[in-house]
Amino acid sequence: MKTGINQLWTNSDEFPLAELTVEVAVQTLWVEPVVKALQAAGGSPLIAGQIDEVLSILRFGQPTLLILSEGFMDNDSGQNQLLEYIQRMPAVPRRELFVVWIGKNIKSGDRLSAFSHSVNLVLEPEKLTDIIDRIKKSWILWKEMYQVFVQTRLQINGF
C-alpha cells in the first residue's frame, strides 16, 4: 500500500512509522537490526532481495521511506545503482521520498554528507541501534522544510 505524501502534512507532528511504506535495501549484515528497530517502532518494513524489486517499487508504487546502504547489490564498479537512480530522480517524486543512507565512510547525521549523497539522512552502521530516533529527528526537519510547499500544492492541484 502506498501512503501518499498528502497524508504526511495532515497528521500530527509525530513520526507516523506505522502509516508509512518502508522499503529496506541494505546489505545482509544490517537487515536484521534495521528490521527489528522498524518493527519495534510499529513499522512494517518491506525487505528487498534484488535491485529490480526496489526499482520497480520506486517507479510504480513509491515508498515514503527508503533505507539504503552501501554494499546492497553493488555492481563491479562499486557504484550503488539504487543510490544513482535516486540521485537522478525528477524533483517532484524525489521530494516525496525520504531516503536514509547507511555507509561506513560517513558521520551519522552529517547534513553535508546527506546532501552530497542526495539523501535525507546518513548513518554509520554502528549507529543502527539509534536508527528510529535519528530518522524521527531528520523526518521532522524534512517535514518542516517542505510543509508549506506541499500544502500549497495540495490546495492548488487537489492532490
Image (cartoon, grey):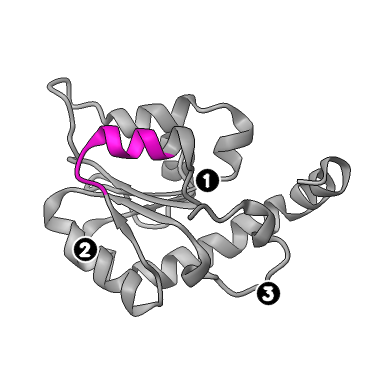
In this view, the residue in front, 22 or 125, is 22
Nearest to N terminus: mark 2 or mark 3: 3
Mark 1, residues whose alpha carbon is within 10 Å: few (<14), some, or many (≥20)? some
Work out how far the residue at label 2 is from the one at label 1, CA to CA, in angstroms: 24 Å
Asked if residue 59 is among those painted magenta in the image, a careful observer would answer: no
Q: Which mark is residue 131?
A: none
Amino acid type at mark 3: Ser
The residue lying at 47 percent from left, 35 percent from top is: 60
| Residue type indicated by callout 1 | Leu
Q: Find disc 1 in the rendering and name its residue.
A: 97
Q: Label 2 sits on what residue type? A: Glu
Residue 92: percent from left, percent from top:
64, 34
Q: Does the magenta stretch include residue 55?
A: yes
Asked if residue 59 is positioned above or below residue 157 in the image, the reply reads above
Q: Position of residue 145 (x, y in %)?
A: 69, 53
Q: Earlier in the sequence, mark 1 or mark 3?
A: 3
Depth check: give the residue in front, 117 or 95: 95
Point 60% across, 75% down: residue: 14
Query: Which region shows up in magenta?
Result: 48-57
| Element under disc 3 | loop
- Identify the residue position indicated by label 2 in the image: 126
Camera-side residue: 150 or 107?
150
